[in-house]
Structures are given as C-alpha cells and as structure tokens.
Amino acid sequence: MQIKHLALLALLASTAYDASAANRPSGYTALCTEYATCTVAANTTVAFGRSDKFTYLVLSGSFVCSEATFGTGTRVSGGVNECSIPSSSTSSSASSSSTASSSAASSSSSAASSSSSKSSSSSSSSSKSSTSSSSASSGGSANVTLPAWPGCPSYVAPSDTVPLTAKIVVPAGTTYDGGGKRFQLSGGSQSEGQPPVFELEDGASLRNVVIGNLAADGVHCLANCSVYNVWWEDVGEDAATALGASGTTMRVDCGGSFLGTDKTFQHNGQGTLHISRFVADNWKSKGGKFYRSCGDCTGNKGPRTVIIENSRIHNHQTIVGVNSSYTNATPHDVATLRNLLVLRWNGEIEVCHTFKGVVDHNGSSGDAGDEWNTVNCDVSATDITAIDKTGGSKKTGIAPGNGPDPAPVNRIQESWTY
C-alpha cells in the first residue's frame, strides 16, 4: 500500500513538473519528439528543447528533431526534447521513426548550417502581410552594387524568401541566425510608424539575414544588441534604429544596405551606435543620410554617441547628422569617424553635419552646419578617402562648400557607372 502511494506521488510530481516547466513555448503545438523525423510547411519557425529552454530555426520540409539539426549544444539535458511549431502553423507532421532517412539527413545538414539560433515570433500583426516568394521578390543581387568589406562574409542572393505577417522578436540574450534567407514583412516606403522586421531585446543578436524590398522599418534594437552580416537589399523607413537607453550599445558589423532614400541608421535612444566594416550605396536616389541622431523625437535628449569605422559609403548626401545642442540643454552628441571611403557622383558630401535637437512639436531641428575636428565631430580629413571616377572631370565634393577640400582629404580613382 505504501509502495503504491509513493508511486502515485511520484506520478503526480512528474505531472506537476511537466505543467510548470513546459516542453514547448507558449503558443506552440508539439510536432514530434527527439530523434523523430518531422515535416513542416515551407519557412516554418520550429522550437527545439524542453523545460522552458528552446532553440529556434526557420525550416522547410523534413528534418530530424535533434541536436544535429539545431546545432551543437542546443539539446537540453535531463529528459526527452521536443520539436514544436506555432499553433497557427499548418501542414506539419511527424513520423515515428527515430532514424533519419537519407533525404531527411540532407535537410538536417542544410539546417545545421544556420544552427544555434534562438528567437521568438511576435504575435503582433503588421499593417500589410507579404505573400512574395524568392522568385517574385524584386530585391535581389542586381541591387547590391558593393562587395563586402574585406574579411566579412560576401552577400549571397537568397534562394529562399520568408514571408512574415508580424515582426520577429529576438528574446533577450538569444541569437537569431537567419541562415542567409531573405525576410519580407510589409511596406518599404518612408511612411512613419511601420513595424520592424526584427525587434532585438536586451543582449539579443541577429546574424546572417537578408532583408528584401518589403523592408518595413528594418531592425529595432531596444537596448544592447549586435547585428552581424545583415544585408538590406532595400531600405524602407530606416534600415535600423537604435532605441537603447544611456549606457547601451548597438553594434553593427559586416553586411550592407542599398536603395535608401532618407535615413539608413536612425538613433532615437541615448546609447551608442557602433558601425564597422559596412558597405552602403543609395545608387538610385543618390541622397539621404547614412546616420541621423533624432532631431525632434518625443522627449528628445542627448547625449548620443556614434562610431563609424572601416566602411564604404556611396551616394549619401550626409554621412552623419548629429545634434550639437538640444533645446532642453542636455549634452551634445559625439560622432567618431575613422577610415571611411565615400563617393557621391551627383553632389557634395557632408561628412559630419550638425543640427539643433528639439522635442517633438516644440520647434524645428535647426541646421548648424558642417564640422571637422570639434567636440561634436571627431573626424579629420585623413579619416576620409574620397572616390573620383576614373577619367572623369567631376570630383567628389566634400563639404564645406565647392572650394578646396579640407586638406588633406585622401583621393583615389575608381570606375563607376553613376
């Protein structure tokens, strides 16, 4: 009797544990257990793990629910892991076999190339959903005019496009590895208030992603975050926005952005935005700002810090726009620029342009002019290399004015079709 009673207690304890420590994320439905071969519809987010610890991958077709698919170290010890999918997902199934077929093994190997990714899909909706595919997307390699910065991964035109109906939220402290796929959400115009394609919580990392022509408001960084090898085939409202408070840093390393018309990087928070080994070309508009410290945000205040180094920036009218003062008397912004190659074939380049920051609906952000080697603009002429067209009579103009460049600006000649 006592033995039966103890067995019952053990069973109840086990049941209680399963209820409190879930083997699938909230809003997800079990697909199959560890080592089974699962099948999902195209571009489905799959969670792997147990006991409230999960790794996420965007997968298509058949795969093995195992560490081999999701990456070394992703298996959660202490019990049987599960694969699960969002409850709204359809056309998924699982076989009872724990041995992968040769085709599943091939799929597993392919998925493993984007291993160790951890993310969560937000349930919030977007204003417009995309139904595009990789063949229908107008964002492609023809729009990418610059090779990657030396030492960075090259842009590869994606064979797969993931149409989203809502932003992807990357939870705090996790990494989302897109495996080089193209992601599409909505819009892509300069309309204010668009959702981001990706929202990065504190300590989150985004890697190996291509954002297509339905770029919405790109990437939002809420606090500390890192962005590595992300390519914007087209810039929507902005490519990325730093929203972190004072003391936080958004780091962008490698990758590139193209076809922007207004701002590429927007800085609304008070922290630091550090950009390195990046390439950018607004070859169609031949204008816009590569970086802008917000001029008239709600509660707008400084200081903000931007560091841009070892990057090539083509056809932007302004490299950085910072606020040299604020109407609420908060500290000024500081821009540090090092080793930048710049070209703008139809006009002058403002390397570091200053403004007066205001609070939203409280006046306009006044233009304060271009600066070199000041407390606002930590940049000298030797930090900038201007690119002239080989054989062309027109030189790249560097502010201030149409007279002599700030001496000695480095100059090189290259052949461009602009």
Image (cartoon, rainbow, N blue to C red):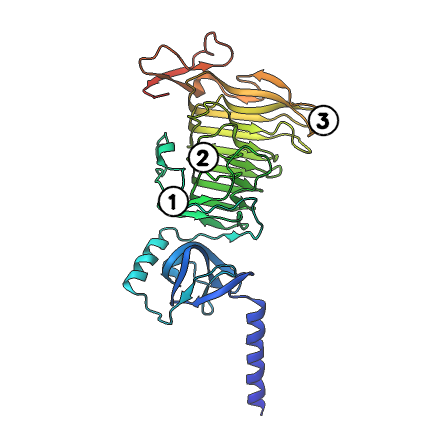
Judging depth in this view, the residue of 330 and 401 nearest the camera is 401
Is residue 72 shown to the viewer in this render? no
Q: Name which quarter of the figure residue 9 lies in.
A: bottom right
How far apart in space, not on screen, are marks 1 and 3 (Cα)?
45 Å
User: In the displayed structure, would residue 353 be above or below residue 259?
Assistant: above
With respect to residue 27, does 234 lie above or below?
Answer: above
Q: Which of pointers 3 and 2 indicates the residue nearer the eye?
A: 2
**Which residue lies at the image location 36% right of the left edge and 54% below the top edge?**
111
Please state the horizontal and vertical placement of residue 284, each as a whole percent of the image. 43, 26
Q: Amino acid at mark 3?
A: Asn
Mark 1 residue crowding within 10 angstroms, few (<14) / some (14–19) / many (20+) = many
The mark that comes first in sequence, 2 or 1, is 1
Q: Mark 2 or 1, which is nearer the eye?
A: 1
Q: Identify the secondary structure beneath mark 1.
A: loop
The residue to which callout 2 is attached is 234
Q: Is residue 182 left or right of residue 124?
A: left
Distance from disc 3 to disc 2, alpha carbons, whole Å, reads: 32 Å
Q: Quadrant of the C terminus?
A: top left
- Whether residues under marks 1 and 3 lie with C-beta atoms below 8 angstroms apart, the answer is no
Res 302 → quadrant = top right
- Comparing 11 with 179, the one in front is 179
Foreground: disc 1 or disc 3: 1
Instruction: Check disc 3 and report the residue beneath it.
Output: 362
Name the secondary structure under disc 2. loop
Q: Residue furthest left?
A: 102
Is 136 left or right of 334, judged from the image as shown? left
The mark nearer the N terminus, 1 or 3, is 1
* Circle 2 residues within 10 Å: few <14, some 14–19, many ≥20: many
Q: CA distance from mark 2 to mark 1?
A: 15 Å
Residue pushed farthest top?
403
Q: Give the quarter of the image for residue 143.
A: top left
Mark 1 = which residue?
134
